[in-house]
Amino acid sequence: MKEQYQRKLEEQRRDKDGFDEKIQEMHRHNIKVESEFEKERALSEQKILFLEKNLDEKSSKEKEYLSNWNNQKSELSNEIRLVCQKYEGELKQLNLLLDEEKERSGELDAQLQDLQQSFKEKSQMWQEQEYRYKMMIDQTQDHAKQIEMAANALKNESLVGLES
């Protein structure tokens, strides 16, 4: 019985040693898992800090870009407004000049029509006077021919009277 008791005791010691070894192995495994967990947690915290910092930088840059964009937009709007005012002023001035030129053109057209009418009237008057002068010249030439013929006739009569 003692032997049996010793065997059992030996068996229980082996079991206890096995359990102790398993406990130590589990303890080492827990330490390893805990260490890996801490390592992962530290890496995650670093990653979170990095991402938060990156996010802050991006947010800051975005605010800066938006501010610059709004400033440029405002400046461009002012430039556009100034250019529009300038060209609207020039357009008004050109429209006034155009209206003046249209009025002047109308006046010149009226003057041209008056001059054309006057030219037509004077041309007709000159044609009538030319016709009268030609008639007078023809009459004067006819009259001169008649006088010449009368003079020749008188001359011939005088010569005929002298000859006889």
Image (cartoon, helix red, strand yellow):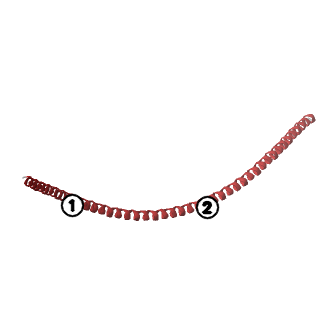
Determine which quarter of the picture holds residue 27.
Answer: top right
In the image, is 15 to the left or to the right of 110? right
Determine which quarter of the picture holds residue 115.
Answer: bottom left
Q: Where is mark 2, residue-wise?
A: 67
Q: Amino acid at mark 2?
A: Ser
| Residue displayed at 40% across by 65% down | 96
Q: Amino acid at mark 1?
A: Met
x, y percent for residue 63:
63, 59
Q: Secondary structure at mark 2?
A: helix
Q: Secondary structure at mark 1?
A: helix
x, y percent for residue 73:
56, 60
* Callout 2 crowding tier (Cα within 10 Å): few <14, some 14–19, many ≥20: few
Give above or below for 114 relative to 153: below
- Sequence-wise, the earlier of marks 2 and 1 is 2
| Residue displayed at 49% across by 64% down | 86
Which image quarter holds the N terminus?
top right
- Depth check: give the residue in front, 129 or 71: 129
Q: Are marks 2 and 1 in contact (CB under 8 Å)?
A: no
Query: For the residues marked 2 and 1, what is the alpha-carbon distance in whole angstroms?
Result: 85 Å
| Tag of residue 125 | 1
